[in-house]
Image (cartoon, grey):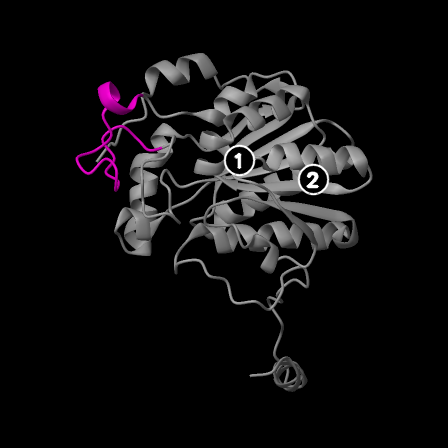
Amino acid sequence: MANTDIEARKQELLNQGYTEVYTKTKVLTDAVMHYCPGCGHGTTHRIVAEVIDEMGIQDKTVGVSPVGCSVLAYNYFDVDFQEAAHGRAPALATAIKRLNPDTFVFTYQGDGDLAAIGTAETIHACNRGENITMIFVNNGIYGMTGGQMAPTTLVGMKSATTPYGRRVDLNGYPLRITELISTLPGTYYVTRQSVQTPAAVRKAKAAIRQAFENQKLKKGLSFVEILSNCNSGWKMTPVQANKWMEDNMMPNYPIGDIKVDGKLVDNVDVARLAVDHPLTVMQ
């Protein structure tokens, strides 16, 4: 159905007394997303776009897309975009922001891009306190390339390269990079959210809005992790994957603010969290 037909049908229903409860933001293009059904990327794209729209900064925003599942993010956002080399999004975002300080710059990266090949760029951008927004989607696996173990894969979690489960003696411990960068002086706001329920989506959107507002106020780097499923990589249905994420990922990657206004949240003990939660599959 053409856009003109959709608009005509919409107006017809409004004339009949129906109430519009949701409209797709104009910051999202009409391109059909390539993500697997049930994936958290689509929802995360939507709330990022809605924040940009609601803040009225569409013509001032520049996104940086990674290599990974969201490599084609530039097709879905109607804002200026740059494609970074694998893992280099924070470095590219740094250059864009420094050359155009009045723009709103954000990176959109997965766990392989941000926490594996891009670990150095991530840590140094955060340590420098670049005035950008970093959005990190953590699904605990390499999704696009076939389901290999990622830095965030849990101990005991099966993947294409750990078919019997991740082993500490062979593969080392998972990397809880969000807690790690929260200890760096350049990070102003660090939080972990999710998008598997309507309530979670609302909280995630509020966190993303806060990250962009911090950039507007020149507060430094804001880092928003979005915990997501990967039903294709995990070999589950979307419903099963969301349940598995709640039972296994969330106890190891707790949801909530870690650092606010440049200070670690009082009830979050980053050092103790690392010791008490060895990032192991629960069920």
**Can you give x and y, in whole percent of width and height, for residue 196 in the image?**
42, 49
Q: Residue at left 59%, top 52%?
A: 47
Give the residues in magenta.
153-172
Residue 179, relative to residue 204: is it above or below? above
Determine if the magenta segment contains residue 165: yes
Q: Which residue is mark 2?
A: 212
Question: Which residue appears at 44% of the width and 30% of the height?
Answer: 116
**What amino acid is found at the position of numbered circle 2 in the picture?**
Phe
Mark 1, residue position: 87
Label 1 amino acid? Gly
**Can residue 89 be seen?**
yes
Q: Tell us which disc is closer to us: 1 or 2.
A: 1
Image-quadrant location for residue 93: top right
- Count neighbours of disc 1 (C-alpha within 10 A) and say few if under 14, some if 14 to 19, many if 20 or more: many
- Look at the magenta stretch and give its main secondary structure: loop
Residue 46 shown left or right of residue 140 in the figure: right
Screen quadrant of the C terminus: top left
**Left or right: 231, with 184 as reference point:** left
Hey, which residue is sitting farthest front in the picture? 85
